[in-house]
Amino acid sequence: MKSASKPIRVMIVDDHAVVRSGLAAFLLAQEDLELVAEARNGQEALALCQQHDPDVILMDLVMPDMDGPTATRLIHSRFPRIAIIALTSFHDETLVQQALRAGAGSYLLKHISAQELTAAIRNAYAGRPTLAPEAAQALIAAATQPPKPGFDLTAREMEVLKYMVTGRTNPEIAYHLSISNSTVKYHVSSILSKLGVSGRTEAVSVALQHDLIDWSSS
């Protein structure tokens, strides 16, 4: 049972040190909030959850190694009591849908005021969601428009899919993205599941048919 006498334990997950520093200073100024851990990416966040047992996570979405939606999905499945607030600089309908589908209870943009962020953390701890107007609009759009295949692929999964389309093997993908073979296998499995296909050839076919790859970022 949650006690009002204990501070809300918060973890910050963001790959930018300046952002983490700013959020840390903000948390230290609040009597009922306690900073218990900081992580630079999703992999670190996942490991720190077991060690520090936060109540609320402020989760950036676009990060190297393991992005926010992937980390959110894994943390939500393993530590369902932890409330996750997606806190990002990006207004993107796909990111909104990915984060909320992964288990984030709230979605906010980083330009919000300190008062708004404080209220969102307290609400998240109490089980009440907070959505930026942009997130609400994205949810309305998702409800009125049929999603195209691959809409829920994370940024990292899109990178892996791009290499799959160009015929790279798992070890080659691991080398180019500086991640482990097991991580590549996990991403490939997730891609196949999200695209509703049974193999790499089908995944590549769907990617090409629906123009899922943004070649301009190559």
Image (cartoon, grey):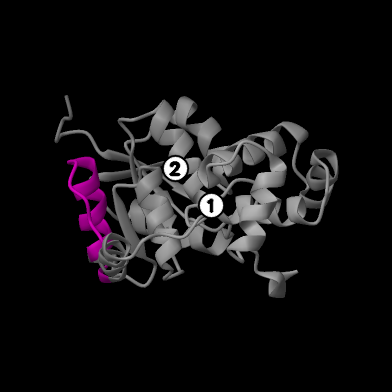
Read off the residue under disc 2: 72
Report the predominant secondary structure element of the magenta stretch.
helix
How far across and how far down the image is residue 85, in percent?
34, 51
Q: Quadrant of residue 186?
A: top right
Helix, strand or loop status at disc 2: helix
Residue name at image x 39 percent, y 35 percent = 76
Q: Which residues are magenta?
A: 116-133
How far across and how far down the image is residue 58, in percent?
39, 50
Residue 29 appears in view: yes
Q: Nearer the viewer, residue 126 or 176?
A: 176
Query: Relative to residue 80, is residue 5 drawn left or right?
Result: left
Helix, strand or loop status at disc 1: loop
Residue 37 appears in view: no
- Neighbour tally class for label 2: few under 14, some 14-19, many 20 plus, Cα within 10 Å: many
Q: Mark 2: which amino acid? A: Thr
Read off the residue under disc 1: 153
Q: Nearer the viewer, mark 2 or mark 1?
A: 1
Quadrant of the frame with the C terminus: bottom right
Query: Relative to residue 125, is residue 146 drawn left or right?
Result: right
Residue 122 covered by magenta stretch: yes
- Neighbour tally class for label 1: few under 14, some 14-19, many 20 plus, Cα within 10 Å: many
